[in-house]
Amino acid sequence: MQHDIVVVGAGAAGLWCAARLGELGARVLLLEKTPRAGTKVLASGGTHCNLTTTLGEREAARLFGLRGERFLRHAFRVLPPRAVRDRFHELGVPTVEAPLEKIFPASGRARDVRDALLRWALAHQVELRYEHSVRTIQPHESGWMLEVEHTTSGQVSKVRAPQLVLALGGKSYASTGTTGDAYAWLQALGLQLVTPVPALVPLTSHTPWVVDLAGIALEQAHARLVDRQGRLTAERARPVLFTHQGLSGPGAMDLSEPFARAEVERRDCEVELCVDLVPQHTQEALRERILQASARPGAPQLARALELDLPRRVMDAALVQAGLATDVRANAVPKPQRHALSVVLKGLRVPIDGTRGFDWAEVTAGGLALDEVEPGSCAVRGHPSLYVIGELLDLQGPIGGLNFQAAFATAEIAARACADRLPKDHPPDDHFPARS
């Protein structure tokens, strides 16, 4: 069979793109180097798959930072989060909303999401070849030439691609097949890459008091990145979990990229992580509460007298960081320490010495520089008929379905752009509207 378009990588972005192309009338070959499609989809969200967000298109795009927002503005207009939900409903996967702007399949099964994408692609005659690993890509007079190895037999063949879409993902969760294969191909084409680092990854800390807090979850915490001058650079109001290795939970993982990048580049991190333990209280209110506690009769212990909804071990850590004994009496706290404690409660400084690496990262930060790609189509500048989508791009959003949303939206605009280049004798399938 002669193919109009070859898509490499049968993950979330690749499946969506291939299915949409088939729907738009293209003859599509989808190559996947592992024995199954959507392995990372199956593992996502604790096997529940947080597939998009309740946020609107603009709010969702903002969470990718200034450069990411500018790049994704068009893609999220074309395929906003609401449209992703609608499409999955059409594909037989009803969805439900969850706290923290999350959207899950109503069944709670990631497999239903993967299977729906796979059915969609196969229903539109996408040819899917498993265990086919692309070794190289080369520009060709009629598009692209791929050298492909069958991973079981070792047989190597050539595949011609009039148009080529790369959807191989990054390097996170390498056991799912995302091993960064495409980075070398893109560099060989003279394209700029931003050094890939693990992101949305647990942080490590070997500081004894941090390890001693293992198992404690702060559901209402606000995690903040603060630079060396004490200025706030980023913040996430999400739960934080202390572990035997350091910190996990979305509040910490959402802010992990600077630590991962510093670790990879072998330099000191330019920010530190602070945790607001009591975001419901202002610092002024805390100072007043500490002052009132000091006037209580009977000289109670300060930790008890403050009546803050904090685990005792966390409160003890805050007292020590403020220069106080854990059993200090409320009436024995000097004025400087009262101020220091109010500061610590609003920003417990947690020493971070690294991350748990790609094996524990939910996504990869870095990848193909956005300046190399047309934001309206995901076409690579200077390389006609080549498209890059999904996690292979230098895009990273926080936990909460944002990265799947980016994968689906970039896949959608690439599919439309590829379809626009098809010969006119390829009418789109009318099962779904060709344009929306």
Image (cartoon, rainbow, N blue to C red):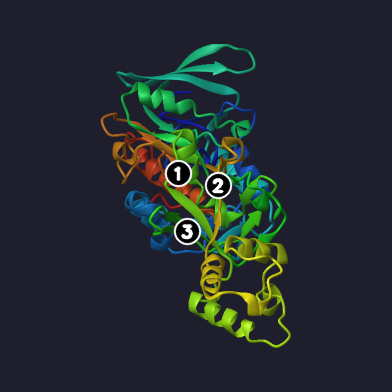
Amino acid type indicated by mark 2: Ile
The residue wearing badge 2 is 352
| 51 vs 183: above or below | below
Q: Quadrant of residue 389?
A: top left
Dividing the image into 4 quarters, which one contains the C terminus? Answer: bottom left
Q: Which of 80 and 249 is in front in this view?
A: 249
Report crowding for label 2: few under 14, some 14 to 19, many 20 or more residues within 10 A (C-alpha): many
Q: Residue furthest left?
A: 382
Q: Which residue is drawn at 57% across and 82% down?
A: 291
- The span from disc 3 to disc 2 (Cα, nearest Å) is 34 Å
Badge nearest the viewer, 1 or 3:
1
Q: Position of residue 289 (x, y in %)?
A: 58, 81
x 69%, y 51%: residue: 109
Task: Estimate how packed mark 1 is, as few (under 14), some (14 to 19) or many (20 or more) residues with alpha carbons within 10 Å.
Answer: some
How far apart are the two marked residues, 2 and 1, measured between alpha carbons? 9 Å
Position of residue 204 relative to residue 241, above or below, is above
Which residue lies at the image location 60% right of the left edge and 67% below the top edge?
Answer: 220
Residue drawn at point x = 58 percent, y = 17 percent? 150
Name the front one of labels 3 and 2: 2
Left or right placement of residue 160 versus residue 278 in this view: left
Sequence-wise, the earlier of marks 2 and 1 is 1
Query: Residue 164, position in %: x, y?
Result: 40, 29
Pointers 2 and 1 in contact (CB under 8 A)? yes
Which residue is the site of mark 1?
269
Amino acid type indicated by mark 3: Pro
Sequence-first tag of 3 and 2: 3
Residue 81 is labelled as: 3
Q: On screen, 417 above or below 175?
A: below
Few, some or many C-alpha atoms within 10 Å of disc 3 (few <14, some 14-19, many ≥20)? many
